[in-house]
Structures are given as structure tokens and as C-alpha cells.
Amino acid sequence: IADATLYYVGAAGGDPSVASNWNTTAPAACGAGDASAAPGSADTIRFDADCDNGPTQTADMTVTGITFDSGWAGTYNMGNYNLTRTSSIGSITIRGTFIHGSGTLTTTTTGSGLTMGGATDTFTGGSGTVDIQGTSNSAVNFTDGTVTLPNTFKTKGGFVLNANIDSFSNNSGEVEYYGTTTGFMSIGSSWSL
């Protein structure tokens, strides 16, 4: 399937490289999918609130888009692998729990970003790197939930950590700005890097 949007319907912690863990239409529930192939670099992977399961990567993945729908409460686990998003439109908006692991999470275009704003949402950074190449002042925007930074968090744009965040840990990591213009950083008064 080329240029498709594929919905995860496999078991919690299932293998995202298995085609039957993906459905070509929005699911009514988790179960066997109808995709003829696992997601490829031209595809968008999507996580629908009607199936709160999320996968655990068993290999590196490159996809055009990653969408976590409002209300999705599952867990996406990168494990020890890389996850690359290539779309120039929009951001990865974390819903549920996102476990970063020891790989590299990358958005590759200037129009991309990483956001999280739900009170029950969690971003857990690991020993790897997050590399957000979006250049807007809000390329990285954490407004609510629980945030643990990875060892290295790189951004070409702004980094916003709102005071409404329920819990924050810098994990002894660092935030590195490597854009070509003046960077923007906003840290809520409750937190420090």
C-alpha cells in the first residue's frame, strides 16, 4: 500500500512491522487488520481512540506522518530503534504515553514539530536523541501532562515548557538549539533545565 494512512489495531506492544497489525480504515475496535503491507516511508501511521493499543518497535521506521487522535490512551514504545517523520505539515502531537527509548526520534522538515497538551499524556525520554527540525517558535511545545527529557533534545526552533506541566524531569539531559536564527525558549516558573 503506497501513500496510505494505516491505523494500528494490533495487540498492546505488538510488532509494527507486521502488516496484520494495521488497518486501512479507522477501526471500531482492536483486532486483525486488513493492510497488505506494514507502513512504509510514504505512509502515515495513525492511532485511533477506538483501539487504545500501541506498538513496540522492533526495527527503525520512517513514515510520512504520525497521528495520535484525541482520546487515544495507549502506549507507543520506540524501544531501541529510530523513528523518523518526513512530512512538512504539522507536528507530532503526543497522546497517551510515548516512550522514546535509546533510538532517535526525528522530524525532518522546517514545518514540523512535537507537541503535547493533555493532562494525562506522558512523554518519556530515554538514552537516545530527539531531533526536531521545525523552525517555528513553538516547534517543541509541551503545555500539559508529564515530561521526561531524553539525554539529548535538539531543536532548530523554539522550546516551550509550560508551567501547567504536571511533572517534569530533565533526566540529566540537555536541550540543544541548532537553528540558523535566534532561538526561542520559554520555561514555566515551576521548572528548570
Image (cartoon, rainbow, N blue to C red):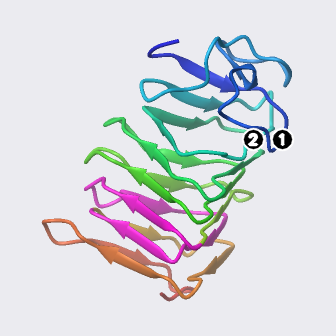
Residue 138 inside the magenta-drawn segment: yes
Mark 2, Cα crowd under 10 Å, few <14 / some 14-19 / many 20+, is many
* Residue at x 51% of width, y 16% of height: 4
- Looking at the rendering, the stretch of residues picked out in magenta corresponds to 127-156
* Residue at x 80% of width, y 44% of height: 13
Q: Amino acid at mark 2?
A: Gly
CB atoms of marks 1 and 2 within 8 Å: yes
Residue 54's disc is 2
Q: Give the residue at the far left of this rendering.
A: 180
Q: Identify which residue, 101 or 87, lies in the foreground.
A: 101
Query: Circle 2 — which element?
Result: loop
Mark 1 lies on residue? 12
User: For residue 177, which quarter of the picture?
Assistant: bottom left
Query: Circle 1 — which element?
Result: loop
The vertical placement of 65 against 187, above or below, is above
Q: Position of residue 58 (x, y in %)?
A: 67, 45
* Residue at x 51% of width, y 52% of height: 82
The vertical placement of 135 against 112, above or below, is below
* Residue at x 36% of width, y 59% of height: 138
Question: Is 32 displayed left or right of 118 in the figure?
Answer: right
Q: Amino acid at mark 1?
A: Ala
Mark 1, Cα crowd under 10 Å, few <14 / some 14-19 / many 20+, is some
Question: Is 170 displayed left or right of 110 in the figure?
Answer: right
Residue 135 inside the magenta-drawn segment: yes
Q: Position of residue 25 (x, y in %)?
A: 66, 12
Q: Identify which residue, 192 or 131, lies in the foreground.
A: 131
The vertical placement of 18 against 135, above or below, is above
User: For residue 99, which quarter of the picture?
Assistant: bottom right
Q: CA distance from mark 1 to mark 2?
A: 5 Å
